[in-house]
Image (cartoon, rainbow, N blue to C red):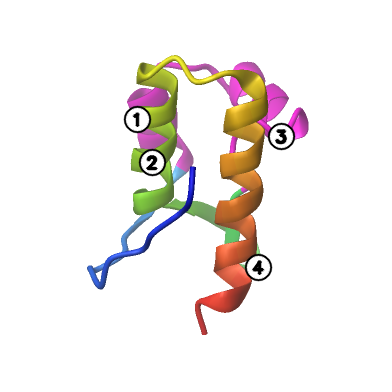
């Protein structure tokens, strides 16, 4: 799965919204991040983090499509790499 970013406004979602979107609790969210099955948050301040909404949408689609863990890990890797290329 290749990550294609459209020229759209990117929003940052805080943890409560991400947890609601994915239907997960805190432990599951951070367990999936630790296992490479979800993107880590980005720092938006000294004590604040958030997730790019377009990345959350792509991961929702992957989970809904019942992609394998390997496919989801590959997507997460691509999304994190694309963050560095965004500038």
In the rendered image, the vertical position of residue 49 relative to residue 69, given as above or below = below
Q: Nearer the viewer, mark 3 or mark 4?
A: 3
Q: State yes or no: discs 2 and 1 in contact (Cβ < 8 Å).
A: yes
Q: Which residue is mark 1?
A: 61
Q: Which residue is mark 2?
A: 58
Q: Which residue is mark 4?
A: 46
| Residue 61 location, quadrant | top left
Q: Position of residue 13 (x, y in %)?
A: 38, 49
Badge 1 density bin: few <14, some 14–19, many ≥20, Cα 10 Å: few
The magenta stretch is 15-40
Residue at 38 percent of width and 41 percent of height:
58
Q: Is residue 86 magenta?
A: no
- Whether residue 13 is visible to the viewer of this picture, yes or no, is no
Horizontal side of residue 87 vs 46, given as left or right: left
Sequence-wise, the earlier of marks 4 and 2 is 4
Q: State yes or no: discs 4 and 2 in contact (Cβ < 8 Å).
A: no
Residue at 71 percent of width and 34 percent of height:
36
Q: Position of residue 27 (x, y in %)?
A: 66, 18
Q: CA distance from mark 3 to mark 1?
A: 16 Å
Which residue is nearer to you in this view: 7 or 29?
7
Q: Is residue 28 magenta?
A: yes
Residue at 58 percent of width and 31 percent of height:
72
Residue 36 numbered tag: 3
């Amino acid at each position: 799965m290749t990550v294609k970013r459209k020229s759209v406004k990117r929003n940052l979602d805080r943890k409560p919204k991400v947890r609601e979107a994915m239907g997960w609790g805190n432990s599951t969210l951070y367990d999936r991040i630790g296992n490479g099955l979800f993107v880590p948050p980005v720092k938006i301040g000294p004590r604040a983090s958030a997730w790019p909404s377009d990345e959350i949408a792509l991961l929702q689609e992957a989970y809904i499509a019942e992609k394998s863990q390997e496919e989801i890990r590959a997507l997460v890797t691509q999304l994190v790499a694309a963050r560095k290329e965004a500038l």
